[in-house]
Amino acid sequence: MSHWPASTKETDQVTHPAHLTLDELAKGVDSLPASPTDSGIVEMIVVRPDDNVRATPETIELSRGSGVADDHWSRGRYAHKPEMQLSLMNAHVLDLIAGTRTRWPLAGDNLVVDLDLSRKSLRAGTHLAIGTAVIEISEKAHRGCAKFSARFGEAAREFVNHGDGPEQRLRGVYATVVEEGIVSLDDVTKRM
């Protein structure tokens, strides 16, 4: 794990903007730029080498056995659930919720992308080519949890979990690795 640059513990992120209210989030999401539906860009890569630790490398390896190389998913409580191997979140939505790009890693999503992740755009089973890898969008819903609430506020959790949040997949999506490969920052994420 020592090869990851810029590893930070969650407690290192002590300065942060005030959490937005539900009304502010609802108004903010309406003014976000539209993300592309067929192909987008990888804006950030996040690896979780351990609980509450984040690294933001420029390149990662995806494998069918362990998901994101060195991510704690393969050693954690969800390792027996391949449908949760990796997670993606929309960059614009995350920026709204987090308030600043430096807080994006706290969400814990492996790939932050400028791509429309809504159910209408990406049905479960859709394959995405990303870097030299191929992933498949999972049926498993990605929901805001207590940690998400602690990091971004209870209103943020309600925002992603209720109303249009699940249909728009504001919390993001889970995916499974179909073809192993390398993913780097600024790689194109393209529907197959």
Image (spheres, rainbow, N blue to C red):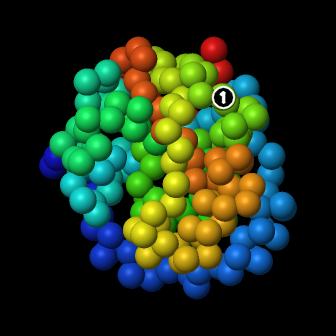
**117 relative position to 157: left or right:** right
For label 1, the crowd category at 10 Å Cα-Cα, with few meaning under 14, some 14 to 19 and many 20 or more, is: some
Which of the image's four quarters has the C terminus?
A: top right
Give residue 47's position: percent from left, percent from top: 33, 47
Residue shown at 67%/61% (left/top)? 162
Image-quadrant location for residue 62 = top left
Residue 43 drawn above or below residue 60: below
**18 relative position to 44: left or right:** right
- Residue closer to the observer: 139 or 2: 139
Can I make out residue 151 in this image?
Answer: no
Residue 12 drawn above or below residue 190: below
Give residue 108's position: percent from left, percent from top: 41, 55
Callout 1 secondary element: loop
| Badge 1 amino acid | Arg
Give residue 173's position: percent from left, percent from top: 54, 41
Residue shown at 68%/56% (left/top)? 165
Give residue 20's position: percent from left, percent from top: 65, 79
- Residue closer to the observer: 7 or 70: 70
Residue at which label 1 appears: 123
Image-quadrant location for residue 68 = top left
Image-quadrant location for residue 98 = bottom right
- Count up the numbered dots: 1
Residue 137 drawn above or below residue 134: below
Residue shown at 32%/57% (left/top)? 54
Residue 34 drawn above or below residue 68: below
Can I make out residue 22 in this image?
Answer: yes
**57 relative position to 129: left or right:** left
